[in-house]
Amino acid sequence: MYFTQPLHRNLQRAPTRLMTICGDRRRTLQQFVERVARLAGALRELGVKRDDCVAMLGLNSDRYLEYCFAVPWADAVLNLCNTRWSAEENAYALNDSKTSILLVDETFKDVALGMCEQVASLRHVIYVGEGATPDGMYGYEALLAQASPVEDARRGGDSLLGVFYTGGTTGFPKGVMISHGAFWSSQIALDAEGLVPPEATMLRAAPMFHLADMSTGYVGVLEGATHVVLPAFLPDKAMLAIQRHGVQVAMLVPTMIQLLVNHPEVASYDLSSLQHLVYGASPIQEQTLWELQSLLPQLQLFQAYGQTEMAPIVSVLGPAQHTAAAAAAGMLRSCGRATRAVEVRIVDGDGCEVPRGSVGEVVVRGPNMMSGYLNNPGQTQAALPGDGWLRTGDGARMDEEGYIFIVDRLKDMIVTGGENVFSAEVENALSSHADVAMCAVVGIPSTQWGESVHAVVVVKPGSTPTAEALIAHCKQRIAGYKAPKSVEFRTALPLSGAGKVLKNELREPFWRDSSRHVG
């Protein structure tokens, strides 16, 4: 079980099949594998050793895919940087993982130069953009041209595939350690759900740093797919790519689906080739699904539920549960049933399974569980207390047929536009403002983002900050998408007898009429 295995299998079967389409560049599988071997050789020549972390900060590209395979080929460890994080957040992740080499594109080259001064372990920066190579960086194509290809290390099993950083409840990102065996197990189980037909053409428009896209994309590699890569999702660009290349499979987050179905010119594009669409990463409005199915009646829909700690898949809701009859039975509110090799239980506070239909915490186990959080034994112990089950922090119920229905989040995480935001991170930023006495942050319904970040603030006596000023203050300290979209001022926050803010009372008015209570 090793990440690069399907490259070798596919090379035997169809070496001349198109592997990637990225702008004007088209590369066969044989060309792709040769470039991966050369990049791995270049990394070795730059001093990368076994278990070293190699990071990438950039938009989607065919070179991003080459990086993802070349790093394990060189016996090293992936670190996919979040393009929506601030420089300080990504610098923290690079320092925490002791990353030695960073690949960066045109969009983030200036950010990378700034991070070089903050990351002691960083030795080299490789520029993967199309422009002139900045001073102090190596040019990607020049490196590949000069490098000698190396043999695949066939790094696998319990060896670390990557450190995948998520938001942290303490205000710092957590590095989720995923082994090759864990990732492989997750994607083999996902492949068995039939998301990607053999040798399909698939769209890669969701962020490649996100494990949701990496997971679905890897299933495409397992099935010998051709990958049509867009730098980022723009509805007109995505629809044009589907039309031009006959795309059959796509993975989109609900925000992207909303932008697509609401596009004023959607009817002018031929999207009839699209057969399978995978969605997930945040809640989706049922109305959006109806509009999508009305627009593309041929479409088979799959919802995937999971989290980074499970590499990432826990359950799938398939096409049979997206019919009108299933919707009438409330199945669109489910996130499906456990995938193969994964066990799911709903438990009470003592870890005992609750009766079907009762609400409790989702706990999961399987070969795809994380190895732990890097350099964070305390939070590792909280998530993996030693009984073999991972605590997800999600509240849910399960019906008699094993379908899971998420009803709330037990930990204070907000999923906005497919990205995780922990309220503690936002509260830390807010509370650093001189005029803020107390604050609490919750997720509230958003037709555009699934959830949006809402702040409830108590100001210090005599202070009169504006909502705009507090939002701007947060954006100077954390990523823009984490900053509050709205601010509500109160004279006091609801508190429990122990002095804990009762966030359920803050959320309740917003979610009262929602069919799906998250936040």
Image: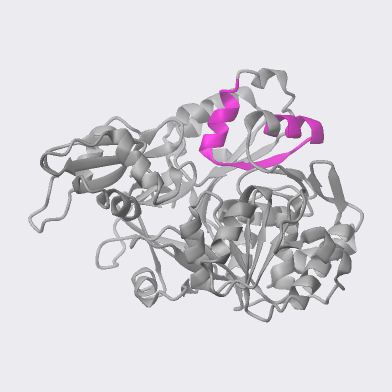
Residue sitting at x 68%, y 34%: 238
Frontmost residue, 160 versus 432: 432
Q: Furthest residue to the bottom?
A: 50
Horizontally, is 278 left or right of 220 in the view?
Answer: left
Residue sitting at x 79%, y 67%: 39
Residue sitting at x 55%, y 59%: 114
Frontmost residue, 185 versus 458: 458
Which picture quadrant has residue 22?
A: top right
Q: Which residues are magenta?
A: 238-263
Q: Is residue 161 visible?
A: yes
Expressed as whole percent of the image width and height from the top left, the position of residue 290 reads 52, 26
Above or below, 355 relative to 145: above
Q: In the rendered image, which quarter contains the C terminus?
A: top left
Number of labels in the image equals 0
Let me know if residue 253 is in the magenta part.
yes
Q: Furthest residue to the front?
A: 135
